Amino acid sequence: MIELCGRYYIDEETAVELQKIVANLDRKMNLAKYVGDVVPSAKAPVLIAHNTIVSLELLSWGLKNYYSNGLIINARAETVSEKKAFRDCLGARRCIIPAKGFYEWDESRNKFKFYNKNETVMYLAGLYDEENRFVILTTKANQSMEKVHPRMPVVLRNEWIKPWLMENKETNYILNEVPPLLDSKTEMQQMRLEF
């Protein structure tokens, strides 16, 4: 089975919204150059909190996998507190990955774009490590996605943003909530199959 959420995207409207969200944004960070598809290992803007201050940082997508080649790009919300690699991150280094939406492929390799037509920005729950690398948390797919893939990113409702970043006591509650329903459309592109 293909890994879930192996690509997401940021559009110009999302980049403008991010600049509004983070008033103390470092002027050297040019968000316009981060518009487009974000793939594993790429640097991307991520919201993190230091005490009560939220900042936008550039982190690399994917934690180093010390047991095999490649990167760990997703972590299961249901077991993240049990895994040594993520336990410390869950308690101290939660982050939010802002996106316009994400892509997923069905069993026939048809590409689908998932987004929320009522929101400018989609906020994905994540964790980051001490090397400034992040993973996207995933959960059981809700009915808007289950026909394409059995899992989906943990999509944060707007009222969960502050608690996810700053309140440890809300973490388990948020991880166990069903993400909001999403809109989707089929992209007429298939994954390349290697024979």
Image: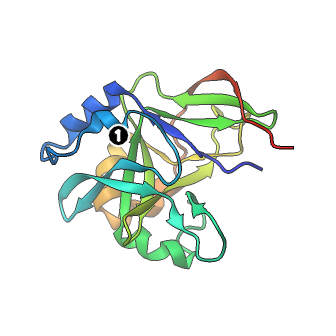
Residue at horizontal 31 percent and vertical 57 percent from the top: 165
Where residue 52 sits in the image (x, y, percent)?
Answer: 17, 60
Question: As displayed, is residue 104 above or below residue 183?
Answer: below
Identify the residue at image location x=21%, y=36%: 19
Report the front residue among 19 and 157: 19
Placement of 50 over or under 9, stated as above or below = below
Which residue carries the number 1 mark? 158
Q: Say whether residue 182 is visible.
A: no
Res. 190 visible in picture: yes
In terms of depth relative to the viewer, which is nearer, 3 or 192? 192
Q: Is residue 171 left or right of residue 54?
A: right
Residue 168 placement (x, y as % from top left): 35, 67
In percent of the image, x 28 and y 38: which residue is there? 31
Residue 94: quarter of image:
bottom left
Q: Amino acid at mark 1?
A: Asn
Residue 67 percent coordinates (x, y): 64, 77
Residue drawn at (28%, 51%), measured in percent from left and top?
A: 162
Q: Is residue 122 above or below residue 139?
A: above
Q: Quadrant of residue 84?
A: bottom right
Most extreme residue toward the front is 195
Q: Is residue 102 left or right of residue 187?
A: left
Q: For the image shown, how many numbered marks are present on the structure?
A: 1
Label 1: few (<14), some or many (≥20) within 10 Å? few
